[in-house]
Image: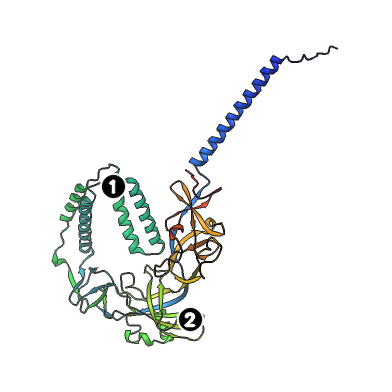
Amino acid sequence: MMTHIKKPLDPEQKRRLLKRGKKLLAILGIVLAALYCCYQFYQWRFPSNLKTEVALEQSVYDAVDAQIFVVRDEHLLSNTASGKVIPLVEDGMRVAKGDVVAMVFPDDADAANYLRAQELEEQISYYEQLAKQYSSVADVNALNEEAFSILLDGLDAASSRAFPALEESMDELGETLIRRQLAMGEQVDFSAKISALRAELANLQVSSDAYTTITAQRSGYYISSTDGLENTIPYESAATVTLDTLQKALEAKAAPDSGSVGKTVDHFDWYLLCVIETDALVPFESGNSVTVRMPFSGADSFTAKVERVEPGEDGVSLAVLKCSLMNESLANLRQETAQLVTSITAYYAPPPDEEGAERESPTAHTVDKGVRVSSSAVRVQDGEKGVYVLRGNVVRWRRLNVVYSDQTYVISATTDRNGETIVDNPDSYLKQYDEVIVEGKDLYDGKIVG
């Protein structure tokens, strides 16, 4: 058996092998460094681990549920004509005696032609204004931001069932998108559109003999519909109504008159007669003001004055509220489920000074609204609650003054009911429309993420 004896490497071979090993290590180090740099660049350019949401304003309140019946000083408008009724005045608008408030057409076709003619005239006026207003172009990025802001306003209005505000936002969005088209160099032919609308309008002939006008028989607010409940509780008896009478009114069935031309309301003041659980009466006293919300109708929130509170039996009580505000969203309220809002009191004290001493005692503030953000976005930094937001591609820290919180979200407020600032340096706090980072790792103020 032969044994192979390894010859020792001479110094030159050792030097070559060592040099080759160093070169391989250097190449491996360069590859690893390159891979690491690529990974860091990808993380910076495509921060897929970030999840954000837009901070939106939300009301902050405690509320008591109530069943309400609305009483106004209502007078039905007489109508001798028959056919399709077209109101000419918005509900809740003030009219004088003798004003034309509606038109009655003998058939639906004539009424449809009249409404289409009105729509065409509005569209012609709209496009003529656009042609004048948007003859010059604007910055595309600024228009993108404006369109996004308007869209958020519209979503906010939709979520709160403020339908007139939603319609206004959608009109503004349409105008902004047209301006964006112009800014991007697209051609918008207003003249062709206006000519087409005028041609259609010319083909619609609506004779004055085709309709009967309805005039207001007395001054007051005009309401275009009736529900058959106008005299269920007389206006003169509203302030002294009994709980039993009110409960019967709440159970009464509405019976709208399909041929009615509406009614007028004489007095500015109208009543909300409320049935409330007796245990919830504690916040209400005669003479106090209360905010009323209508979560199941399109009516805006409004303020009413407590006129009378009367505890009842079987766990329910009566409250009489009076209001003098009137608009389109309030004009048709009758039997409703409402929320009577009591105030939210928030306490805020400025943070300690540099020496650790408190600056002043906490002060109570009445808060109606704040900015909502998911609880998962809230972090604590140096003992203070806040969130990280994206400003372009830079992470920024925003403080929170929490006035409400639960497992799902928190609400932060920087002003009270009267709009007075209740925090120091409000610019450092979360604001509406901030892009809040809900999920993300290794965040810090000033970090560039892409």
Quadrant in the rendering for residue 291? bottom left
In the image, 361 versus 437, the foreground residue is 361
Mark with earlier residue (2, 1): 1
Residue at x 21%, y 54% (from the top left corner): 129
**Label disc, if present, on residue 138 of the rendered structure:** 1
Q: Is residue 271 above or below residue 439?
A: below
Residue furthest to the front in view is 355
Q: Nearer the viewer, residue 427 or 330?
A: 427
* Colouring style: rainbow
**At which x and y percent is residue 8?**
76, 15
Q: Secondary structure at mark 2?
A: loop
* Marks 2,1: beta carbons within 8 A: no
Placement of the N terminus among the 4 image quadrants:
top right
Q: Amino acid at mark 2?
A: Leu
Specify few, some or many for label 1: CA neighbours under 10 Å numbering under 14, 14-19, or 20 or more.
some
Mark 2, residues whose alpha carbon is within 10 Å: few (<14), some, or many (≥20)? some
The percent coordinates of residue 149 (x first, y second) are: 37, 54
Q: Quick one: 287 or 180, which is closer to the camera? A: 287
Q: Amino acid at mark 1?
A: Ala
Callout 1 secondary element: loop
Task: Check disc 2 and report the residue beneath it.
Answer: 281
Q: In the rendered view, would you say 38 is above or below 294?
A: above
User: Is 77 placed above or below 386 here?
Assistant: below
Q: Where is residue 189 drawn, in percent x and y?
A: 22, 46
Viewer-nearest residue: 259 or 249: 249
Q: Residue 184's spot in the image, x, y percent?
A: 30, 43
Question: Where, by quadrant of the figure, is residue 414 drawn?
Answer: bottom left
